[in-house]
Image (tube, grey):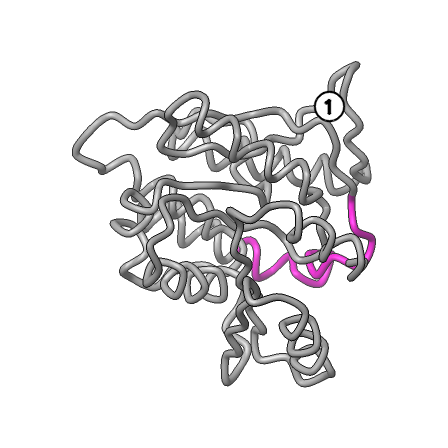
Amino acid sequence: MQTSAFLNFIDSRPDVQFYFINDGSTDNTENILKELQGSSDRISILSLSHNRGKGEAVREGVLKALLTNANYIGYLDADLSTSLEEFYNLHQIMLDRNADIVFGSRIKKADTNIERSLARHLVGRTIATVIDRKLKLGYYDTQCGAKIFSAAILKQVVNKPFLTKWFFDVELFMRLKKHEKELNIFEIPLSSWHNVKDSKLNALSFPAVIKEIYILLTKY
């Protein structure tokens, strides 16, 4: 992430508060985040004592954000594969449509710039198809790391830890299916998304991914 671009963004968006979650990193991550925090009073840091996986890191950040008076809470990947501007656009769509949930979708179209390796795309679509055939969520891309929720709705589905590390997004949607009222949910094709080459999801993750798919299909 380019610090100057981030600070320019947050300076121009007075309605935005950022929470950075340090998931038990043992490198210089915490010092970098503290330096960034000193640049704006709308940047907060939550450092977990040990690595708990993306799902629980996101959940802890959401729980902290819920202690504020925010009406909307969202999360996106720290590598900014979805840009800050694109993410903010999802927020604007949420306001315009009076939505409960808006999330990005990496649908490649003629007018979009979706850069994703062929291998990751094929693996991702295979996994998504298997999950959707069983759980019947009806969405194209539950795994895109750009989602915004009404705080009131989100509060009801993050009270318990997630069962999986890679598929906590799917768990969120499964919990939402049990909500007492019909929700206004919009899946919005992103205009731009860039694959990050050093993603932690790789061939070595395959056994863990299979295990988590099994957990999803048996627990939900």
Left or right of 100 in this view: 49: right
Instruction: From the image, tell me which residue sits under label 1.
Output: 108
User: Where, quadrant-wise, is the N terminus in this rendering?
Assistant: bottom right
Q: Secondary structure at mark 1?
A: loop
Q: Residue at x 48, y 55 (%)?
A: 212
Q: Position of residue 153 (x, y in %)?
A: 29, 42
Q: Residue at x 57, y 80 (%)?
A: 24
Q: How many marks?
A: 1
Closer to the camera in the image, 85 or 175: 85
Outermost residue to the top: 110
Q: Position of residue 97 (x, y in %)?
A: 42, 21
Q: Residue at x 47, y 41 (%)?
A: 148
Left or right of 45 in this view: 115: right
Q: Quadrant of residue 122?
A: top right
Q: Position of residue 205 (x, y in %)?
A: 66, 61
Closer to the camera in the image, 170 or 25: 25
Closer to the camera in the image, 58 or 100: 100
Check residue 205 for magenta coloring: yes
Closer to the camera in the image, 81 or 64: 64
Query: What is the span of residues highlighted in magenta in the rendered image?
Result: 195-210
